[in-house]
Structures are given as structure tokens and as C-alpha cells.
Image (tube, rainbow, N blue to C red):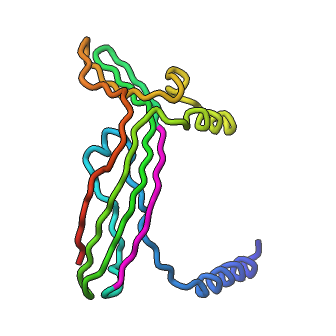
Amino acid sequence: MRRAGRLSVWASALICLAQVAAAHADPILTRNQHPLVALYGLPLPLAARLPGAGSGSLGATVNWSNIATTDTTDQRSYTLDGEVFEVRVQAEHALGERFAVQGQLAWRQLSGGSLDSLVESWHDLFNLPNGSRNRLPEDELLIEYRFGESTLLRVDDESSGLADLPPSATS
């Protein structure tokens, strides 16, 4: 491409970028769905800006995740096979120009789920590896950690209910 042509491309790109207005973005309201990490109740990210004084927001998120992995060595083995489904309602309200409160209420389910065949079909469609999925039963829950002959953790019963209720305040 000639020098004049390259300059016109760059000039056009700069003109287009100058026309773009600044956008306001909120954080993506998702959390780590790993069944063992979720036990710690890590908070969702907070917005970078406070809402206007006296105003607020109400929203809901749905997170649905599927996990299937195994690993075995001489001394230890673990299996993580299951699904986490979570519905979370979040409310935020500014009490003034410099202070806001936020609360969340979540319902969470740990189960064998129903996504295994969908995930496997997705992997087949794009010729992706299935990893441990081929060695695990379909749509069953098993979270297990063994060290030597001892089973240190075993979860195979489905459970559901209200999750953590993390309030937060920002200024």
C-alpha cells in the first residue's frame, strides 16, 4: 500500500474513533461457580461509579455452570463432576452523593444437572477434546477427594437453598 493510502486509512480510523461517545459500563455480575470455591462466599464486583443520590437499581443474574474433571496420582485422586445453577437478585441504593449500600439474595443448586450431553455435543461440533467427560457418568453428581486409602471429601447428594447474603457499602 502506498504511503498516501496508509495515511488515509489511519486518518479515517481516527475520525471514526473521535465520533465514538464514552460508554458507561457496569461489571459483569458473575462469580466463580466452582463448587469448592463458592463455599467462601466471594463478593460480586462493585460498580466503578455510585448511583446518583437517592437513586438505586435492582437486577437479577442467572449463572449455570457445568464441571467435569478427574485427576489421579500415586497418592491422591479427585473428581469434580456436577452442575451449579444460581439465581441472584441484587439491589443497590445511594444514600447520598458519596455513600451507597448493596445487598444480594441468591438461591443456589448443586446437582448432577442436565448439561453434560449439551457440552459434549458442543465439543464434538467444534472438534474440541472432552477431557475427563468420557470417563464420567452422564448427569451425575460426584465431588470426591481421596488421599491414599482415605476419602477426605465426598459429596454425591444434590442440594439447594438460599446462598450467602453478602451486604456491602461503598463510598
Q: Position of residue 70 (x, y in %)?
A: 42, 25
* Position in image of residue 60 (x %, y %): 44, 63
Q: Is residue 30 left or right of residue 165?
A: right
Q: Quadrant of residue 142?
A: top left
In this view, 62 is above or below 117:
below
Task: Name the residue at the top extreme.
Answer: 149
Q: Is residue 59 magenta?
A: yes
- Give x and y (percent) for residue 8: 72, 82
Using residue 9 as the reference point, say whether residue 140 is left or right of it: left
Is the residue 59 above or below the residue 165 in the image? Answer: below
Taking the spot 43% from the left edge, 35% from the top edge, the residue there is 111
Magenta segment range? 55-66
* Coordinates of residue 15 in the picture (x, y in percent): 64, 86
- Residue 156, compared with residue 75, is above or below; it is below
Is most of the magenta stretch helix, strand or loop? strand
* Quadrant where the image shows the C terminus: bottom left
- For the point 51% across and 83% down, the residue is 22
The magenta stretch spans residue 6? no
Query: Which residue is at 61% across, 87% downward?
Result: 19
Q: Quadrant of the N terminus?
A: bottom right
| Count of labels in the image | 0
User: Relative to residue 1, is residue 68 drawn left or right?
Assistant: left
Nearer to me, 166 or 133: 166
Q: Identify the image quadrant of residue 168.
A: bottom left
Q: Is residue 72 left or right of residue 6?
A: left
Considering every residue shown, the one lying at the far front of the view is: 161
Q: Measuring 33% from the left and 68% from the top, which residue is drawn there?
A: 46
